[in-house]
Image (cartoon, helix red, strand yellow):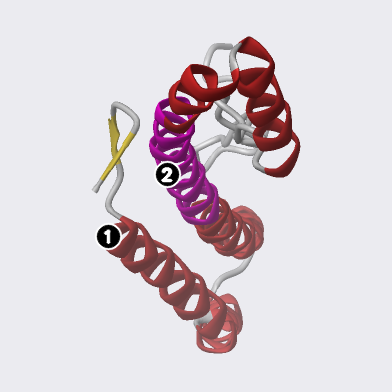
Amino acid sequence: MIVGDIAFDVHEARSAARVARRAAETLRGQAGRRSGAVGGALDDFEGAYAERFGSAAAIEAEDRARLAGVLVDLADQIDAAVNAAERERQRLRDHAEWKARDADRKRAASGAEAFAGAAGRSVVDAWESFTDPEPSTEPEPAHGRWRRSSRRCTRTARPCGTSTLR
């Protein structure tokens, strides 16, 4: 469906939110198995490789948890966008209905003016603007909380601070 001049499919958005939440649950569900696998592998490693493998596993676990949180945040933001789209559609419907009522009032006011003069029209206009005010013509402002962060990862087997040049 079209909201203003923006195409927004509520069903697709809700589906995307469900997928993001399922992916977050999957990532969180992997923690135990992955931790067990890392523990078993560390039994067979020793020295610098064991340290690097342990560090990499710890980073992976932190990143997996962070990604799961980001996916849940994404799903929450999609839900907020769906709610905002539904409110905007309702605002547009309300305003369109008001415009139709306003056109009817103007026709009726023309009759009142023909019958009672300008005073009759003024009374009708004042009464209607009091009992049926025009809905907002402005969309609500967007309230997105977008953030991006990344971690710089070293992808070598060499401990930090060592050089290959001598």
The span from disc 1 to disc 2 (Cα, nearest Å) is 28 Å
Residue 122: x and y in percent read 68, 19
Give the labeled residue for mark 1.
12
Q: Quadrant of residue 73?
A: bottom right
Specify the segment rendered in magenta: 81-107
Up the image or down, 2 lies above or below 57; here it is above
Magenta span main SS? helix
Towards the viewer: 153 or 150: 150
Q: Is residue 101 magenta?
A: yes
Up the image or down, 47 lies above or below 164; here it is below
Give the labeled residue for mark 2.
97
Q: Residue 90: in sight, yes or no?
A: yes
Up the image or down, 24 lies above or below 102; here it is below
Instruction: Kindly report which numbered mark, 1 or 2, lies closer to the viewer in this rendering.
Output: 2
Please tell me how crowded label 1 is: few (under 14), some (14-19), or many (20+) other residues with Cα within 10 Å.
few
Residue under the point 44% across and 27% down = 111
Residue under the point 34% across and 30% down = 4
